[in-house]
Image (cartoon, rainbow, N blue to C red):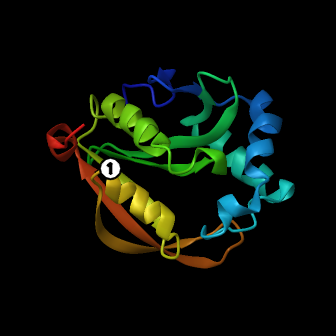
Amino acid sequence: MNFDIQPLLENERIILYPLQEADFESLYAVAADPQIWEQHPNNDRWKQEVFRLFFAGAMQSKGAFKLVDKVTGKVIGSTRFYNYNQQENSILIGYTFYATSYWCKGINRLVKGTMLDYIFQFVSKVHFHVGAANIRSQIAVSRIGAEKIGELELISATGVPQTNFVYQISKEAWVASPA
């Protein structure tokens, strides 16, 4: 891989800062809301000890971001690039969550659009893994033009197998999509 999966990115509303160890408390303050995780396969991620594992994985990925509202300066969530596949020329975007006060405001489109604009300079496909019961996230990735291409059984951090849907968007589809 000859590109950075954790650059500083921004759009008109949000700054995507590379995640740092010092960001734990501010990010957990957002993640502590159980409503965020209701449809998520790991729906207890609002608990500090569970979120600590999530955060450790985010740091290990070296592709995670802290999302900050440019107007208020508030931390509003997180997302990441991960699992670059050189052979397929693809990468995954996921582990995304937003404060509920930012739901239904076009933030996901802005964040993912900024990430896709950046990463499609280097890859031809982006995948998303979405929990089978996570209807909210399935709708969100469909709205940015990703299409469901399959299902995958993944083992959760607790060792429990969980069905995820695999979505994909190609560089060509992204470039051709309306703004």
- Quarter of the picture holding the C terminus: top left
Of residue 83 and residue 134, the one placed in the foreground of this image is 134
Of residue 64 and residue 111, the one placed in the foreground of this image is 111
Of residue 47 and residue 125, the one placed in the foreground of this image is 47
Using the rendered image of the protein, determine whether residue 138 is visible from the camera's viewpoint. Answer: yes
**Horizontal placement of 168 versus 104: left or right?**
left
Give how far across and how far down residue 32 sits, in percent.
79, 53
Type of residue at label 1? Ile
Using the rendered image of the protein, determine whether residue 99 is visible from the camera's viewpoint. Answer: no
**Dot 1 crowding, Cα within 10 Å, few <14, some 14–19, many 20+:** some
Residue 12's image quarter? top left
Give how far across and how far down residue 116 sits, in percent.
34, 37
Judged from the image, the secondary structure of the residue bearing numbered disc 1 is loop
Give how far across and how far down residue 175 sits, in percent.
18, 37
As displayed, is residue 40 above or below residue 140?
below
Q: Which residue appears at 38% of the width and 74% of the height?
A: 151
Q: Which residue appears at 40% of the width and 34% of the height?
A: 115
Q: Which residue appears at 46% of the width and 37% of the height?
A: 111
Give how far across and how far down residue 162 sits, in percent.
55, 77
- Quarter of the picture holding the N terminus: top left
Q: How many marks?
A: 1
**Horizontal placement of 124 versus 36: left or right?**
left
The residue at which mark 1 appears reads as 144
